[in-house]
Image: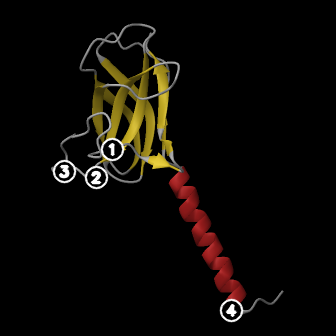
Amino acid sequence: MKLGKIAISAFAITLLAGSVHAAHHELAVKASDQDVSGGTVTADEIMADANGWMVVHRTGADSKPGPVVGYAPLKKGKNTNVAAILTEPVKSGDMLMLMLHGEKGGMKTGIFEYTLGAKEDGPVKVDGKLVMDVVTAK
């Protein structure tokens, strides 16, 4: 089969667009229900497209992010066993949302500046959806 230059270029652009789209969807937070009695919560794996933060929000059955109760820095790429120190007690049965946040919009790099609803170091979204996982404390 003989393809012209235009067909090959269109094919290359389609492949490139597909790989960029696929890479964007690799952003993820993966975590499991766990014992948090030691004052920490851990994500098994987080894929980040830039340096940022794993932010721990309280949540409930509605899966809406509530107050921040911990955070940990992330590097661009694959992060494993990311532990955040909890800033207040979490009881067995409490639900926690581990969410990917960026390092954009703040005044200082490397300083977590987000407060609920703020734009500084805010949540990362893919297609309008938060990149997160919900765990239940044991």
Which class describes the residues within 10 Å of circle 4: few (<14), some (14-19), or many (20+)? few
Residue under numbered circle 4:
5
Residue 29 makes an appearance in the image: yes
Which amino acid does the dot numbered 3 rest on?
Answer: Thr
Spatial separation of the CA atoms under disc 2 and disc 4: 40 Å
Task: Give the percent coordinates (x, y) of residue 72.
Answer: 28, 34
Q: Which is closer to the viewer, label 4 or label 1? A: 1
Q: Are marks 2 and 1 in contact (CB under 8 Å)?
A: yes
Q: What residue appears at the point 35 percent right and 53 percent down from the top-left corner?
A: 50
Spatial separation of the CA atoms under disc 3 and disc 2: 8 Å
Color scheme of the displayed model: secondary structure
Residue under numbered circle 1:
122
Q: Which is closer to the viewer, label 4 or label 3? A: 3
Q: Nearer the viewer, residue 20 or 101?
A: 101
Q: Pick out the residue farthest to the left.
A: 108
Residue under numbered circle 3:
109
Up the image or down, 137 lies above or below 110; here it is above
Residue under numbered circle 2:
104
Task: Give the percent coordinates (x, y) of residue 30.
Answer: 49, 33
